[in-house]
Image (cartoon, rainbow, N blue to C red):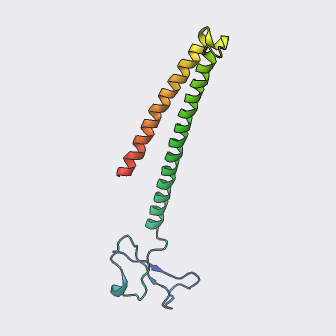
Amino acid sequence: MTETLILTPGHPAGCSCGECGCRRAHLEGAHQGDDCQHGICLICTGCAECEEREREEAHGKYIDHLVQVLAGEIGEALSFAGRAERSLRELRSNQVYDIELAEGGAGADMLAELQDAARHLRNAERIIKWRIDLFKEG
C-alpha cells in the first residue's frame, strides 16, 4: 500500500502543522482511524486514480442518460409514425377520399413507407430496451 503526503492548500512543503498528513486512497479501505501513524486520516481528495474513476462514473451516467433520451425519442417517433399512418388512412377512406392519395400509387407507397418506418422503429425500440435491461442486470 502506498501513501501520499498531501499538504493543506496554502501550506509550504514540509509543513508539520498537524492539518497536513497522510491521505491514502479510500479504495483500499485499510487505512482508517486508530492505525494511522500520521495523526490525520482523510479519504482521498484528488489522487489520479480517484479522478479517473470519477470521470468514468460521470461518463457512464452521461451514457445512461443519453440511452434514456434515445429510448424516449424512439417511442415518440413510433407514436408519430402511428398517427401519420392513421391520418393517411383517413385521407384515403371513403368518408374523406383524397383522390390523389386514394387512387394511384402515391397513397399506397406512402402507406407502405409509414408501415416500414413503424416496423423499423419497433425493432429499434426492442434493441434499446434490451440495452437498458442488459445494464440493469450488470
Residue 79 shown left or right of residue 126 in the figure: right
Classify 132 as above or below 31: above
Image quarter where the N terminus lies is bottom left
Q: How many marks?
A: 0
Say which of 116 and 35 sits in front: 116
Say which of 110 and 54 sits in front: 110
- The picture places residue 74, in percent across and down from the top left corner, at 52, 37
Residue at point 39%, 49% (across, down):
135
Classify 22 as above or below 70: below
Classify 49 as above or below 79: below
Residue 31 shown left or right of residue 49 in the figure: left
Residue at point 47%, 63% (across, down):
54
Classify 44 as above or below 63: below
Residue 63 shown left or right of residue 110 in the figure: left
Residue situated furthest bottom in the rendering: 17
Residue situated furthest front in the rendering: 95
Residue at point 46%, 36% (across, down):
125
- The picture places residue 29, in percent across and down from the top left corner, at 35, 74
Residue at point 53%, 82% (across, down):
8
- The picture places residue 107, in percent across and down from the top left corner, at 60, 15
Say which of 117 and 52 sits in front: 117
Say which of 119 and 91 sits in front: 91
